[in-house]
Image (cartoon, helix red, strand yellow):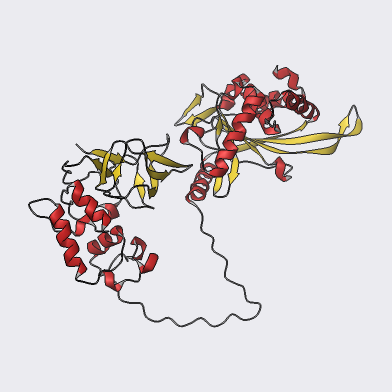
Amino acid sequence: MPKEVIMPALGMAQDEGVLLRWFKKEGEEVTAGEPLMEVATDKVDVQVEAPASGVLTAVTAQEGDEIPVGQVIGLIAAEGEELPPQVESRAKDAPVEEQSAEPPLPSSPVAARIAAEHGVDLADVQGSGGRISKKDVEAHIRSAASAPRVLASPKARRLARERGIDLATLAGSGPEGAVLAADVPLAEQPLPAAQPQPAPALPGAAAEPERQAVSRMWQIMAQRLTDSWTTVPHFYLVREVSADQLINWRKLLAADAAEGTKITYTDMLTKLAALSLARYPRVNSYWNDGEILINPHINVGLAVAVEDGLLVPVIHNADSLRVDQIAARRADLVARAASGGLTPDDFAGGTFTISNLGMYGVDAFNAIVNPPQAAILAVGRIADRVVAVDGQPAVRPMMTLTLSCDHRAVDGARAAQFLDAFVNLIEEPLRAL
């Protein structure tokens, strides 16, 4: 039997993925283990390997399509294998536009290969004997060669056929004027009447705003933060902390670190926060359908800004790592975040998040809880300030911390105990030893 190619589940909460590109065309031979397609999840782009060797055929998904997890989007068939009459989706809510009015006829791998080489949609081929053979595809190619052919993607041809629209009447927006799926209207419509030209803008009139398209990552980030802001009851605790000893500790760690390892304040705060979470595990919990669940591990996520949005890769088991190990892990995550090389495992299992904007000169800010976590720590810059020391004004390097909490999982007293323990460790880091 041919091997099914499905949209994989690359994350615990993933419901669908976006097919970014095929590395192989329909009809081409593939080898098990080689990259077959690239898929975008809500957090990362991942290359998916071929599950078997053979010929890629019966492809039902085009680049850019959003596909439910588990849906069959193609087959890998050995030479001579018969294809099933219909590729059934495993998803109950398969997109309507991807469902054909009639199930496609089965086709041989050779017929699929020839069709792919000539850009022929097998749905347009008239089969014989209940299947599509090599001769049927060749006959379709010969008949099409005698008539002018409209350049169009297979998905656009299918949509036009289902909606009763002549492709020749559509203006394509693809390469060389090819008609794409987006160019096919929902129903056959008359040409729009000529619209009057707007009058030229008067001097001083307001200009039209610039519209900027956003990436899928940004859209998902916006949706999740909106959900968090509107459904999670936030409260905030703010503490100012002396950074004297933190600065001295960093110098000691930098002197002992291996060559090429850069210790940052974020690395040190990650370690100290993890130790504080071990002491107050309620802050390392989350609210779930009327219950508070305490996470068995302490995995600290670090908010990382990239061009397309915000990512939160995770330092797993941060409480058991040395600061230099955390620094190496953090440097690797940040580098791969910038290059698009993060994997789903890099995001899995976060239980607490740190967002540090001190390097941008920010004194303090309130962060939005990263669901389903119970808390997120916002870190401001270290700056000299006048404070009272033994009743006298003195200049000290100070830092402002803001802890945002989900009141369903953590109350003010427990959050305050955690923050106090964390501040004590910052002001006396030797306690961490």
The quadrant holding residue 192 is bottom left
Identify the image quadrant of the C terminus: top right
Residue 165 seen from this side? yes
Between 270 and 29, the one nearer to me in the picture: 29
The residue drawn where x is 49% and y is 25% is: 293
The residue drawn where x is 33% and y is 38% is: 50
Examine the rendered structure and indicate whether residue 393 appears above or below residue 132: above
Between 396 and 318, the one nearer to me in the picture: 318
The quadrant holding residue 273 is top right
Q: How many labels does the image show?
A: 0
On the image, the x and y values in percent for residue 203 come to: 65, 80
Examine the rendered structure and indicate whether residue 172 appears above or below residue 263: below
- Residue at the extreme left of the image, as rendered: 129
On the image, the x and y values in percent for residue 286 come to: 52, 29
On the image, the x and y values in percent for residue 288 come to: 46, 31
Identify the image quadrant of the N terminus: top left
Between 118 and 392, the one nearer to me in the picture: 118
